């Protein structure tokens, strides 16, 4: 976050009007990139698209995006785009909420949950005021500034989570049956997907049979354990193809595939294009 705010007292938080943020920090970025902090954006004007982990979402007035650390994103937006953005580290949030975690909120809980919601006009007006209040506090020099921002942000997350759960069915979050198991599985996959592709091994680490784990995954997200592992592998492949200097063979080996041809077939079967075709959409060699 220091690249956005170089002041000594706000190294874990940053806020801005969206148009100013673009001018100051994103004017030259045209490829997917990722950050190690949480990102929240409300668009109040303009149009375009916002691509998050290679899923494309339309942008319009009332669009809200909530990104986890590590998610890859980029956008193409109209000249009249406007809104609000704030960024913060997990440390910033936890400083005042040591008993809570950001994963309590459904948009941060699971990668299976969408990072976007669309507000009604009335809610857009209400949330615009709330985002602006965060910005005003951020730009102030008042006592207890960080504590006030922290409470404002937490209040925003609570209300956005309520709207999110009203708009979305089948969301994975704390109150769902099996939610903690899905979260545990996602954490294990994140840690081991490069070297371990077997559903049976993940089930073993979770002290259950592969059949039982698959039943949990099917009932929760309508997919198999194998699909979740494959999706994570392909997401990392896309991230590397879109911005790294590694060639496709090196990327395949890094992801645990000594057989480049097999990796290429797997990629094409699941995405509809070869790794080379995908790469060419983001990098001109």
Image: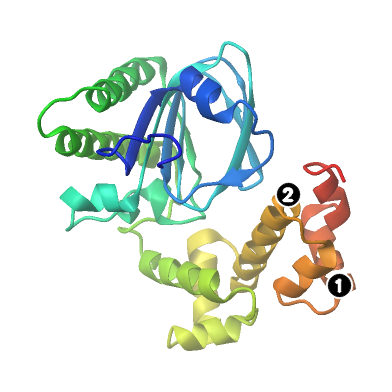
Tell me where residue 198 appears, x and y as whole percent.
63, 82
Compared to 264, does 133 lie above or below?
above
Compared to 170, does 55 lie above or below?
above
Q: Which labelled disc corresponds to residue 242?
A: 2
Quadrant of res 78: top right
* Left or right of 123, for residue 114: right
Quadrant of res 176: bottom left
Q: Residue at x 87, y 49 (%)?
A: 277
Tell me where residue 19 appears, x and y as whole percent.
50, 18
* Left or right of 10, for residue 269: right
Q: Secondary structure at mark 1?
A: helix
Tell me where residue 117 appears, x and y as whole percent.
46, 34
Q: Secondary structure at mark 2?
A: helix
Depth check: give the residue in front, 253 or 66: 253
- The colour scheme used to paint the residues is rainbow
The answer, for residue 51, to whether it is visible in the render is no
Q: Separation of disc 2 and disc 1 at Cα?
A: 18 Å
Q: Residue at x 21, y 39 (%)?
A: 150
Q: Quadrant of the N terminus?
A: top left
Depth check: give the residue in front, 217 or 31: 31
Q: Residue at x 42, y 66 (%)?
A: 183
Compared to 62, does 272 lie above or below?
below
The answer, for residue 9, to whether it is visible in the render is yes
The mark tally for this picture is: 2
Q: Which labelled disc corresponds to residue 260?
A: 1
* Left or right of 190, for residue 28: right
Q: Residue at x 36, y 68 (%)?
A: 180
């Amino acid at each position: 976050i220091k690249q956005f705010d170089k002041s000594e007292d706000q190294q874990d938080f940053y806020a801005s009007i969206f148009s100013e943020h673009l001018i100051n920090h994103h004017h030259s970025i045209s490829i997917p990139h990722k950050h190690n902090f949480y990102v929240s954006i409300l668009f109040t004007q303009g149009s375009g698209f916002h691509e998050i982990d290679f899923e494309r979402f339309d942008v319009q007035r009332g669009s809200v995006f909530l990104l986890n650390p590590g998610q890859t994103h980029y956008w193409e937006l109209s000249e009249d785009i406007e809104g609000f953005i704030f960024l913060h580290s997990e440390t910033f949030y936890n400083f005042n909420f040591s008993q809570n975690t950001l994963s309590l909120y459904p948009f941060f809980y699971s990668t299976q949950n969408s990072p976007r919601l669309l507000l009604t006009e009335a809610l857009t007006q209400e949330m615009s005021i709330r985002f602006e209040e965060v910005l005003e506090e951020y730009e102030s020099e008042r006592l207890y500034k960080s504590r006030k921002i922290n409470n404002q942000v937490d209040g925003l997350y609570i209300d956005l989570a309520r709207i999110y759960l009203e708009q979305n069915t089948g969301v994975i979050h704390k109150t769902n049956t099996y939610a903690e198991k899905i979260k545990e599985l996602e954490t294990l996959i994140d840690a081991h997907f490069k070297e371990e592709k077997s559903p049976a091994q993940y089930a073993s680490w979770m002290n259950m049979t592969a059949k039982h784990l698959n039943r949990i995954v099917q009932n929760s997200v309508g997919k198999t354990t194998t699909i979740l592992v494959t999706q994570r592998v392909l997401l990392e492949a896309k991230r590397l193809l879109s911005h790294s200097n590694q060639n496709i063979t090196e990327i395949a080996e890094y992801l645990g595939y000594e057989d480049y041809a097999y990796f290429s077939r797997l990629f094409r079967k699941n995405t509809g294009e070869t790794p080379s075709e995908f790469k060419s959409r983001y990098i001109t060699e």
